[in-house]
Amino acid sequence: MKKVNIVISGLLLLASLAANGQGKFYTKTGRISFFSSTPLEDIDAINRSVVGILDTKTGDLQFAALMKGFEFRKALMQEHFNADYVESSKYPKAEFKGQIANSSEINYTTNGSFTARVKGKLTIHGVTKDIEANGTITVKDGKLTLASTFNVLVADYNITIEKLYRDNIAKTIKITVDCTLSPL
Amino acid sequence: MILPLTVLVVLGVLFGIWKGLGEYNRKNEDLAHVKADVKISTAKLIHDYEANDSLANENYLGKVIEVNGNIKKVERDEKGFYTVVLGDTLVHSSIRCSVDTVHNADAADLRAGSSTTLRGACTGFNKDDMGLGSDVILNRCAVIIKKD
């Protein structure tokens, strides 16, 4: 009888772990960085307080990043970025709402690395655009690491660069997402 | 007379270049050495954002905030960055303070359940849009006071 109880408890534990793996995963310390490269200079910035949630049952994926949370190497660049380009007091947040299109092909319960095709709407500076990007989901010990790199056009988001700095800031910005999500 | 004037002009130009380069290369300051714009309790800052985040942004966004309160938890991510979470353990909302890496050792000493005072730059408010609780976010935080 004792053995049966142990087996049942073990099965319940496994079932609960499996259910966990097929539920929601989140982060509040996700990283999103961007990189601009021109012959005059390279500019990069990182935000380490990105909030994100993935529902592995539906593939629904959502991220939010506060614009003032992007840190630059140079304070002057950070000030220009917030005041003149993304107007972070008026538009304090960038958001992505979308889906992992091939979520059903990803085994969220087994350690491994999977290619993910992400589609959704990215809102920056009050402008929402459809985007598609490929990425990787790495499953390790019950956590998911989402990694993706994609490009956005500055002009698509109504961000105007003054003439003086047009040669310093690229027209296309590379965005890198690197977020480790824990079970909710 | 012409020579001293030329020297003065050259010195003036050099001074301008030096000041310009200094400004261009200026780094973000360590907030441990910056006077706080606002000193506030954890409960009051959370309350103000939850009551009216637009108004709270006018008062706090982009400002250097010194906040005191209970430590809910201290998180260290896989890359070694610390986040100190302040708030009442019975309340879902928090203040999340991303610690400036120069203050990592101080953050590592903090313990959940004790109280502290941190100083950081307010980057805004994440409303509870995703069912994860709402958070006020402070960046580049320095540990000002540790208490057990």
Image (cartoon, coloured by chain):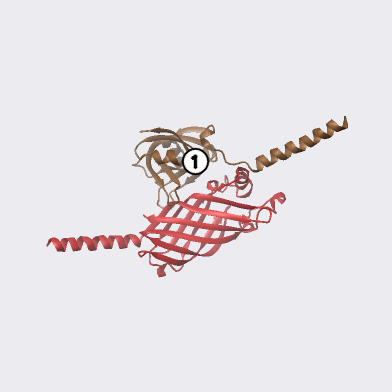
The answer to which quarter of the image holds residue A146 is: bottom left
Which chain wears red? A
Q: Secondary structure at mark 1?
A: helix
The answer to which quarter of the image holds residue B82 is: top left
Position of A106 relative to B132 (above/below)? below
- Estimate the x, y position of residue B144 in percent, counting from the top left: 46, 33
Q: Pointer 1 indicates a residue of which chain? A: B
Q: Which three-letter amino acid code belongs to the residue tagged 1?
A: Val
What is chain B's hue in the picture? brown
Position of A52 relative to B107 (above/below)? below
- Estimate the x, y position of residue A37 in percent, counting from the top left: 63, 56
Answer few, some or many: residues within 10 Å of disc 1's Cα (few below 14, many 20 plus, some between 14 and 19): few
Q: Is residue A94 visible?
A: yes
User: Please, which residue is most extreme toward the left here?
Assistant: A1
On screen, residue B1 versus residue A24, left or right, reads right
How many marks are shown on the rendered structure?
Answer: 1
Tell which of B5 and A102 is nearer to you.
B5
Q: Which residue is mark 1?
A: B102
The residue lying at 50 percent from left, 57 percent from top is A177
The residue lying at 21 percent from left, 60 percent from top is A9
- Estimate the x, y position of residue B95 in percent, counting from the top left: 43, 41
Position of A161 relative to B6 (above/below)? below
User: Please, which residue is most extreme toward the right here?
Assistant: B2
Tell which of A172 and B30 is nearer to you.
B30
The residue lying at 45 percent from left, 54 percent from top is A52
The residue lying at 45 percent from left, 40 percent from top is B51
